[in-house]
Amino acid sequence: DAGVIQSPRHEVTEMGQEVTLRCKPISGHNSLFWYRQTMMRGLELLIYFNNNVPIDDSGMPEDRFSAKMPNASFSTLKIQPSEPRDSAVYFCASSWEANYGSYTFGSGTRLTVV
Amino acid sequence: DAKTTQPTSMDCAEGRAANLPCNHSTISGNEYVYWYRQIHSQGPQYIIHGLKNNETNEMASLIITEDRKSSTLILPHATLRDTAVYYCIVRSLGNEKLTFGTGTRLTIIP
């Protein structure tokens, strides 16, 4: 298995532009999580899905952020419009319902908004 | 979920056992202890978890005290590749969310 696949690995964009981060979870996993990591705030859970349905989006910082999971093999995290304070590493993780708490993380997307 | 307390940083000599402590004095009966680590520039990696019995796998051992108020992650023969930030997390059964704290930065010294 290739693991959790995130793209792009790096993204540099100008303030005000739309950014879309992508994630392909491990096949068979039915939960998907989006985290953000910064030096100041550490690892923060933004949103998670179970069976493609958003369960908890209380960590999404504001309306500029949105996430979708149209099917079991794909999810996106969109920021529109982007701001410099959104610069961070964004991680996607997936897990299997019967093995709660054992997440597999992707390699992350390093986002820089200038 | 119960709060955890970990030392900010630790050093360990290569080849020796690395013992990472975690305090979770407010843990309740249905809460598990999880350990993850994050090597620089990579995503966090699951290591091990347990409820009340000691656990061992190919990566590490987890020792949970009888009163469950603290635990220790043991890397039996540390290598330079074990240099990472180690997170101790308490999570209740039925709660899918994992909340990461600041962890312990473990440095393995040649």
Image (cartoon, coloured by chain):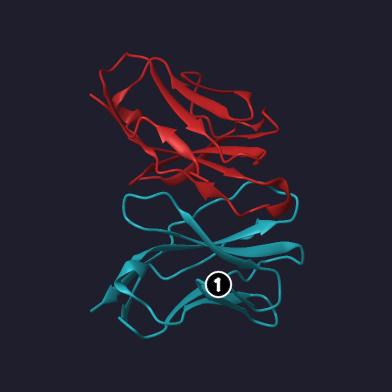
Residue B78 position in % (x across, y down): 37, 78
Helix or strand or loop: what does disc 1 sit on?
Answer: strand
Residue B36 in picture, x, y percent from top left: 50, 60
Q: Position of residue B97 (x, y in %)?
A: 63, 46
In the figure, A73 relative to A99: above or below? above
Q: Nearer the viewer, residue B48 or B104?
A: B48
Residue at 45% x, 43% y is A106
Seen in the image, is B52 located left or right of residue A41? right
Q: Which residue is mark 1?
A: B23
Colour applied to chain B: cyan
In the rendered structure, the answer to whether residue A100 lies left or right of residue A64 reads right
Location of residue A99 with respect to B104 vertically, above or below:
above
Q: Amino acid at mark 1?
A: Asn
In this figure, what is the number of numbered marks? 1
Relative vertical location of residue A7 with respect to residue B8 in this rendering, above or below: above
Instruction: Report the side of B98 relative to A17 (left or right).
Output: right
Residue B73 is left or right of residue A95, and the answer is left
The residue marked by circle 1 belongs to what chain?
B
Q: Picture quarter containing residue A94?
A: top right
Q: Residue at x 43, y 35 (%)?
A: A6
Q: In the figure, the red chain has which letter?
A: A
* Residue B64 x %, y %: 63, 78
Q: At 43% across and 57% down in the image, what residue appears? A: B102
Name of the residue lying farthest toward the front: A1
* Quadrant of the frame with the N terminus of chain B: bottom right
Quarter of the image where the C terminus of chain B is located: bottom left
Task: Please tell me whether residue A20 is drawn above or below residue A85 in the rendered image.
Answer: above
Residue farthest to the bottom, as pictured: B16
How crowded pointer 1 is (Cα within 10 Å; few <14, some 14-19, many 20+) is rated as some
